[in-house]
Amino acid sequence: MAVRSVGFEQYRPLLETVVAVLPENCAVTLLADRGFEHGALIRWLSHQGWSWCIRAKSDLQVTLATGKQQAVAQLLPEPRQANLFHQVRILEDISCHLATANLPTADEPWAVLTDSPPTLQTFACYGRRNGCIEPHFKDYKSAVFELVRSHLRDAQALTCVLMLLATAQLFALHLGFLLTQLGRRYQIDWHGERGLSFLQLGLRQQSASLLSRSVAPPLAPFTSRQSATSLCLSP
């Protein structure tokens, strides 16, 4: 499978904007797919003091602690197994760690590069991409807002649209969190496990309330602990 890659210099301004708006002493972990396996990115992350988990391409050459060099594809384990490689070197001069796993619940084996000593939690950390970030992108595209079909190219127009969508998203997400917390998710989502994102749950609840002319659950503030837990849930 071909993986399209965007050059580091193309998205570096976005990362530097993030640095400018983050609170001081904020702990950051960057999660990235195989298209972001860039030496320049990893060096930049190290300079910023950010942690990172980046999925590795199968043809990436890895120098093990023993000095032996192998491709990632050669380091993948047998089914239902995981391998943890400490102190490896990639892209000539970058020291890091590698965790590989081959589980039947995944479509294909995983190989994750990280700056932190690898454990089985390394896969859970990287897996937050699939449980939080990827559904978020899907909601903005095909699942809910169909942003791509707007064909907008003007920066100011896109900014206005995204601000409006962010407001709607904030309300719907909050409503989706509340439904789940109150044990009422099954009234909207009939999957055995959560099949709809929190945004989709909230929007469907709002539509149901409008159709039935009923009152939606009152919004209430979440504690920081509740909010953090919700953001890590898998769909």
Image: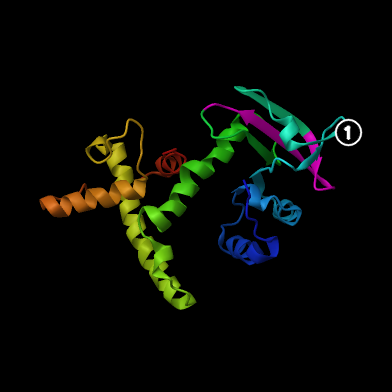
> Which residue is the site of mark 1?
67
On screen, residue 19 above or below 190: below
Question: Label 1 crowding class (10 Å Cα cut-off): few <14, some 14-19, many 20+?
Answer: few
**Residue 104 % position (x, y):** 54, 26
Q: Helix or strand or loop: what does disc 1 sit on?
A: loop
Q: Is residue 92 magenta?
A: yes
Q: Residue furthest left?
A: 213
Nearest to the observer: residue 235 or residue 22: 235
Give, as a single range, the part of the protein colored magenta.
87-104
- Here the colouring is rainbow
Can the viewer see residue 142? yes
Is 168 displayed left or right of 4 in the figure? left
Residue at 42%, 57% in the rendered image: 141
Residue at 52%, 41% in the rendered image: 128
On screen, residue 179 above or below 164: above
**Residue 117 % position (x, y):** 71, 34
Question: How many discs mark residues in the rendered view?
Answer: 1
Q: Is residue 199 magenta?
A: no
Residue at 39%, 69% in the rendered image: 150
**Residue 140 % position (x, y):** 41, 57
Q: Residue furthest front?
A: 1
Nearest to the observer: residue 82 or residue 202: 82
Query: What amino acid does circle 1 point to?
Result: Gly
- Magenta stretch, main secondary structure, is strand
Nearest to the observer: residue 209 or residue 148: 148
Nearest to the observer: residue 96 or residue 4: 4
Query: In which quarter of the view is residue 20 placed?
Result: bottom right
Q: Quadrant of the N terminus?
A: top right
Is 132 displayed left or right of 21 in the figure? left
Can the viewer see residue 220? no
